[in-house]
Image (cartoon, rainbow, N blue to C red):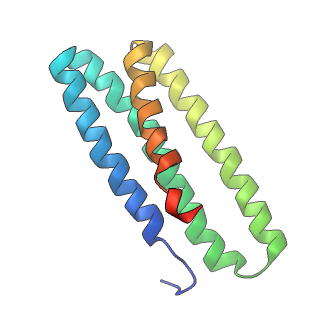
Amino acid sequence: MDSRIRVQPINQLLKKQLVLLGIIVLTVLWWQGASEAVASLYGGSIAVINTLLQRWHLIGAATQAKSDAGMNLRKAYRCIIERWIVTVVMFVVGFAVLKFLPLPLMTGFIIIQFALLFGHKSRA
């Protein structure tokens, strides 16, 4: 992998998110039951998939765009758009198709998003 790509911070974030997701799912399983735990797993996986998509775009931008500011900006906008589309589609599938309960699904998503929000406070 190219030396300009710093994937270690996002890899650490992914590890934090996965550990936190496991804790949430086990807690919800113990507290509310299996169907709510699956819903929270699905909600948390939406946030994890967003982070994986961001990692994929980061590597792609570093290998393809290199130092071209315009291309990097286009790749950043594309990443944002794709993350929004994936998030909306996964929520629609979770609520409309799989018929998950809203509270556990949203709880899983929000808590994992907090790991994203507070995971890089030293790098801000």
Q: In the image, 81: left or right of 93?
A: right
Image vertical order of residue 67 relative to residue 54, above or below = below
Image vertical order of residue 101 relative to residue 74, above or below = above
Looking at the picture, tell me which residue is in the foreground, 103 or 74. Answer: 103
Image vertical order of residue 3 relative to residue 113, above or below = below
Where is residue 105 drawn, in percent x and y?
A: 41, 22
Q: Could you say which quadrant of the image residue 39 lies in? A: top left
Q: Could you say which quadrant of the image residue 86 lies in? A: top right
**Residue pushed farthest left?**
30
Image vertical order of residue 98 relative to residue 57, above or below = above
- At x 44%, y 14%, the residue is 102
**Residue pushed farthest bottom?**
3
Where is residue 51 drawn, in percent x and y?
A: 49, 51
- At x 65%, y 46%, the residue is 82
- At x 47%, y 62%, the residue is 10
- At x 60%, y 30%, the residue is 88
Where is residue 122 drawn, in percent x and y?
A: 51, 62
Position of the C terminus by quadrant = bottom right
- Across the whole image, how many numbered discs are drawn on residues? 0
Where is residue 22 drawn, in percent x and y?
A: 25, 40
**Residue pushed farthest front?**
122
Q: In the image, 44: left or right of 123?
A: left
